[in-house]
Image: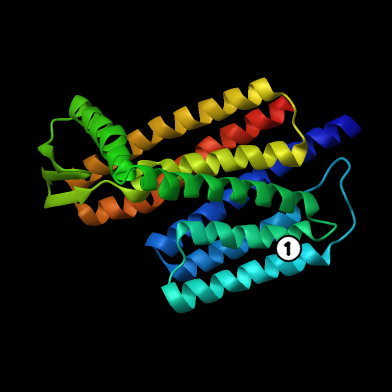
Amino acid sequence: MAHKYMLDSQKNNILIVLLILAFFTGATIQFGEGSAILGIVMFLIALGLTTQIKLQGTYITKSSKFYVVLGIFMVLANIVYNFKVMNKLGTLDSMAFFMGISFIAYGTSKFRRTGEFGIYMSGTFIVLFLFFYSILPSLHNNFIHDFDHYFVLIPSLYIVNTVANMDIHIIATETVHFNGLNDSTVVIGGPCSGIYSMMLLLGIIVGYVKMEKLTDKKRIYLLIFAAVIIAYFSNLIRVSILYIVGYYYGIEKMMFVHVYIGWLIFIIISFGIMTALNRIK
């Protein structure tokens, strides 16, 4: 009976964590490309869902004011800087904000493990973000642009030309032109690279592994490799779909699909990863 309860609790936690990540990612997308109000609503929903996670096993129950104060400072500093100086909340800023919330949770007795998950997840994302968008570009100025062009634009264009006969061709780095419903020029870069999704998925794996103290390194590394490969090819399919929608239905509908299709694909992949991680336990 107790074993069945634990299994049900684990499944419940997987679903809740998935929903938290889905709403948080959706909020990040809305802040960057959609409605700020909808982004705030989705973020508050994600925050509320964290209270529904049922903790299991042994964990530190002593609260820590230091982590709570640190988290509050990070959140306030992030808000002041981004909305007064930048007037927007970017991807890296969203993760720093999420890390601040996670430190607050980590400083409490009830949500310590949930906070631990958030700290490792957001920390992993931030480290990878700085590596790909600061360190590598400092070594090779066109790294991100070359990655977008040779590893995203060209392969996705090959997929489209294989399945459909469209007047679409490359005119510059990261840039395609097509004569469909509209005569349009589209730049495939930034979030379209799929790097954000890969970093976030890796953050999920690291966070969950640390929170649940998983030790099967062979399966964990295999899962990390599989997550990156699946995320990469899923992104190629996503970009290919955007070409098709833009070509046949216009740029406006393509931008609408652009905001939400990546989110849906991320949810599906995240669910698979969380299920696999639970089986490793």
Q: Depth check: 3 or 114 in front?
A: 114
| Residue in the picture at 45% in, 40% down | 265
> What is the quadrant of residue 57 in the picture?
top right
Residue plotted at (52% across, 26% down): 226
* Apparent side of residue 140 relative to residue 39 in the rendered image (left or right): left
How dense is the environment of label 1, judged by Cα within 10 Å: few (below 14), some, or many (20 and up)? Answer: many
For this orientation, the residue located farthest to the top is: 218
Q: Quadrant of the N terminus?
A: top right
Up-down relation of residue 72 to residue 206 (above or below)? below
> Looking at the image, is 250 positioned above or below residue 66?
above
Residue drawn at (49%, 57%) of the image? 92
Q: As shown in the figure, which amino acid type bears the numbered disc 1?
A: Ile
Q: Which residue is mark 1?
A: 104
Farthest residue toward the front?
Answer: 139
Image x and y of residue 32, in percent? 41, 61
Residue 95 vs 164, above or below: the answer is below
Circle 1 sits in a helix, a strand or a loop, which is it? helix
In depth, the one of 58 and 7 nearer the eye is 58
For the rendered model, the colour scheme is: rainbow
Closer to us: 70 or 156: 70
Q: Position of residue 224 (x, y in %)?
A: 56, 29
Residue at x 86% of width, y 61% of height = 63
Spot occupied by residue 200 in the image (x, y as percentages of width and height): 53, 44
Q: Quadrant of residue 85?
A: bottom left
Image x and y of residue 140, in percent = 33, 42
Q: Is residue 67 shown to the viewer in this render?
A: yes
